[in-house]
Image (cartoon, rainbow, N blue to C red):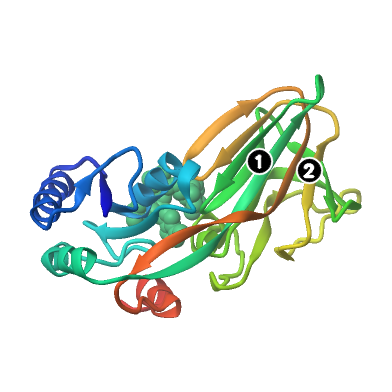
C-alpha cells in the first residue's frame, strides 16, 4: 500500500508526521506523495481541507484519515498518543471506507462559453468585491429570490458544522446527500425580501446564482478564496464525487457534534 502524510507544519505535527512515516516504512508500506492509496493528515480539520484539495484529482483511489494535534476534529479523530495503534491498523487491517458528499461549484463566464469547476469539502461562499452582494437565486432552473446582503454560503453536510453553523444553518448528518444554502446578513425590509431560512437541497436539485448588476465576485471554496471576473452564473449541486475516509473504528458524527459544541 502507498501512503502520504500531510502536516499542519507546526513542530508537534511535523514530529508526528516523521514518526508515522518511519513506522509505516518499517511495515514495508511505500511512501508516494503523487499516487497514495491513503493520505494521513496530521493537524486539524484545516489540514484535512488542504490534503483534500491536494488530492481532488484522485478521490476514487485515495482514502483519508486524520490525526489531530489540537482539539477534537470533525475530520480528524486520532490523537497523537494513538499513532502506534493507527500505524498497525493501517498496515495490517483492511479498513472500512466511509464516503461523505461534496459540493460541486461551476462558474460560467460572460464570454467564450468558458467555465471553471471546483469541489468543496466544507462549503463554497460568494461575496461581492465591494458593497452589497446582489444576485438572483434560481433553484432547479426556477427563479426563487433576489438576494441582497453580505453573501451566500453553500455547504456540504460535513461542512455544516463549520461556516454554515456560524450563519445559523442546520447541522446535517453526512450520510444525507444534500447541500445547504445559508444567507449572510440579508437585507430584509418592505422593499427587499429573501426567504431568511437556510435551504437544504437534495442531490438532484441545482442552485444557481446570477449577477444582477456587478459581474465580479469573491468565491471561496473551503480555505481558498479567488476573485472571479465577468461572471455569468455560479451553479452549485451535490457532486458526483465523494471524499472517502478510512475508518478503523467507529467515529459517530453526533458524538463529535456533542463533544465539540455541547460538552464542556
Ligand atoms: P481557519 O479560519 O484557520 O479555521 C476555521 C476553523 O474551522 C478551525 O477551527 C477549523 O478547525 C474549523 N473547521 C474546519 N472545518 C470544520 C468542520 N467541517 N466542522 C467544524 N469545524 C471546522 O480556516 P481554515 O483552517 O483554512 O479552514 C477553512 C474553513 O474555515 C472554511 O471551510 C470555513 O468553514 C471556516 N470558516 C468559518 C467561518 C466562521 O465560522 N465564521 C468564517 C470563515 C471560514 P481546526 O482548528 O481543527 O483546523
User: Which residue lies under the disc numbered 2?
Assistant: 209
Quarter placement of the C terminus = bottom left
- The quadrant where residue 231 appears: top right
Q: Residues within 10 Å of mark 2 (few under 14, many from 20)?
A: many
Q: Are marks 2 and 1 in contact (CB under 8 Å)?
A: yes
- Can you name the residue that lies furthest to the top here? 112
Residue 124 falls left or right of residue 93: right
Q: Ligand 1 closer than 8 Å to the CB at disc 1?
A: no
Tag 1 secondary structure? strand
Quarter placement of the N terminus = bottom left
Q: Percent from the top left, x then y, of residue 234?
A: 74, 40
Q: Residues within 10 Å of mark 1 (few under 14, many from 20)?
A: many
Q: Percent from the top left, x then y, of residue 53?
A: 45, 42
Residue 122 falls left or right of residue 140: left
Residue drawn at point x = 36 percent, y = 57 percent: 64
Tag 2 secondary structure? strand
Name the residue nearer the viewer: 176 or 255: 176
Q: Percent from the top left, x then y, of residue 28?
A: 13, 54
User: Which residue lies under the disc numbered 1?
Assistant: 126
Q: Is residue 34 visible?
A: yes
Q: As displayed, is residue 167 above or below residue 88?
A: above
Q: Is residue 42 visible?
A: no
Q: As displayed, is residue 230 above or below residue 31?
A: above
How far apart are labels 2 and 1 at the CA level?
A: 9 Å
Residue 260 falls left or right of residue 205: left
Q: Percent from the top left, x then y, of residue 181?
A: 69, 57
Amino acid at each position: 500500500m502507498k501512503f502520504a502524510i500531510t502536516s499542519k507544519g507546526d513542530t508537534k505535527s511535523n514530529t508526528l508526521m516523521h514518526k508515522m512515516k518511519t513506522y509505516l516504512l518499517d511495515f514495508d508500506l511505500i511512501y508516494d506523495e503523487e499516487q497514495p492509496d491513503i493520505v494521513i493528515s496530521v493537524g486539524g480539520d484545516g489540514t484535512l481541507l488542504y490534503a483534500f484539495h491536494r488530492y481532488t484529482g484522485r478521490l476514487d483511489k485515495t482514502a483519508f484519515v486524520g490525526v489531530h494535534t489540537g482539539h477534537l476534529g470533525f475530520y480528524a479523530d486520532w490523537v497523537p498518543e494513538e499513532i502506534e495503534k493507527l500505524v498497525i491498523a493501517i498496515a495490517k487491517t483492511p479498513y472500512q471506507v466511509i464516503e461523505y458528499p461534496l459540493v460541486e461549484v461551476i462558474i460560467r463566464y460572460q464570454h467564450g462559453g468558458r467555465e471553471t469547476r471546483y469541489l468543496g469539502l466544507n462549503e463554497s461562499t460568494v461575496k461581492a468585491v465591494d458593497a452589497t452582494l446582489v444576485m438572483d437565486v434560481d433553484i432547479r432552473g426556477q427563479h426563487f429570490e433576489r438576494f441582497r446582503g453580505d453573501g451566500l454560503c453553500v455547504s456540504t453536510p460535513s461542512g455544516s458544522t463549520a461556516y454554515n453553523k456560524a450563519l445559523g444553518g442546520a447541522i446535517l448528518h453526512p450520510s444525507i446527500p444534500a447541500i445547504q444554502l445559508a444567507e449572510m446578513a440579508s437585507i430584509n425590509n418592505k422593499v427587499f425580501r429573501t426567504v431568511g431560512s437556510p435551504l437544504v437541497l437534495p442531490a438532484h436539485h441545482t442552485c444557481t446564482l446570477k449577477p444582477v448588476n456587478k459581474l465580479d465576485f469573491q468565491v471561496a471554496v473551503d480555505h481558498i478564496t479567488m476573485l472571479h471576473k465577468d461572471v455569468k452564473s455560479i451553479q452549485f449541486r451535490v457532486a458526483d464525487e465523494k471524499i472517502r475516509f478510512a475508518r478503523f473504528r467507529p467515529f459517530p458524527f453526533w458524538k463529535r457534534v456533542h463533544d465539540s459544541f455541547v460538552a464542556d
